[in-house]
Amino acid sequence: MYEYELIENELNTKYIGRVFLQFENIESTTSKCRNISQTCPSGMLVLTEDDMEGNTYLNKDLKNFKNKVLMSLILKLDRNNINKEHAESLTNCVGVASLLSVGEEYFQDLVYYWEKVVKGKEFLAEVDSHKSLKSNDKSIILSLRIYYNAEINREVLIGRLLNKIEKNINLTFVKNQREDVIDICSSFLKSKDTYIQVNKKNRKTVKIIENIQLNLEGNLSGKHKSEDIYINWKDYEVEWCD
C-alpha cells in the first residue's frame, strides 16, 4: 500500500492531497471519486494499487513497468474566470502540465499526445478529467495513471506532482493565467512542427492540419489550407505524424 507519510512529507500544498483514501483494488479511482465527490473536500486524493477498469488509451503501449501510480483528485474549482464548457479540458491541461513539469526531471523524450497520453523513455501516463455523477455537484475529477521505470519513490513522485497541480490550479482557475499551463503542454505537443491528420468520428473524410497548437480552452486547433479547425477529442480521431 502507499505510505501516505512519505507523500505528506513532500507536500507544500494548502488543500491538494491533504485528505486521503487508498484501496487495494477498486473499479477505478475515477469512478470512486465521481460517486463520493459531493460530500468530500476539494483536493481529496484517492489511490489504488490495482483497478478493474483497465487502460482506455494505453493498452497497446503497455509493457512491463516496475512502478505504477493510479490516482484521482476531487476538485471544486472557481469557474468565475472560465466558460464552464471548458472546465474539463482545462483541468486536463492542469494535470498534463503538472505531470510534464515533474516528469522531465526524471525521464527523457517526453511527448504529449493531446488530450490523454504522455509518453517518454521508460515512462507512460494517461490523464483524464470527468464531471461528478451528481447533477447538483460541480466537482471535476482529475485522474492519472502513471507507469515508469526509474529509481524514484512513487510517494515522492506523487507528492511533487500534487504540489505542481495545486500551483497550476491557482494559475488557471484563480488568477486566470492559463497561458502558463497551456504553454507547457504545447511545448511537448506531438507533431507541433509538422502536421496531423484528423477526421470526424464515423466519417471518411480525412483532413491534414498544420500549425497545430493548443488554444486557451485547452483544445487543439490548426489550419486546413486557409480554414481554421478546432478539434474536440470527443468528436475527432487524430493520427499523429513525425
Image: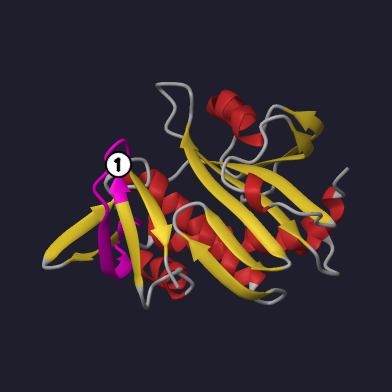
Task: Determine the image quadrant of residue 71.
Answer: top right
Does the magenta portion include 215? yes
Q: Is residue 9 visible?
A: no
Q: Secondary structure at mark 1?
A: helix
Q: Residue at x 82, y 56 (%)?
A: 67
* Placement of 218 over or under 120, stated as above or below: above
Q: Position of residue 191 (x, y in %)?
A: 41, 71
Q: Which residues are magenta?
A: 199-220
Q: Position of residue 221 (x, y in %)?
A: 27, 61
Task: Tell me where residue 162 appears, x and y as whole percent.
Answer: 64, 57
**Image quadrant containing the C terminus:** bottom left
- Amino acid bearing label 1: Glu
Which quarter of the rendering shows the N terminus?
Answer: top right
Q: Give the residue displayed 15% in from the left and 68% down from the top.
A: 225
Q: Which residue is found at the position 54% from the left and 55% from the top?
A: 117
In this view, the residue in front, 124 or 9, is 124
Compared with 154, 121 (above or below) is below
- Residue 77 or residue 195, whichever sits in front: 195
The residue at the point 56 percent across, 50 percent down is 127
Query: Closer to the camera, 92 or 205?
Result: 205
What residue does disc 1 label? Answer: 85
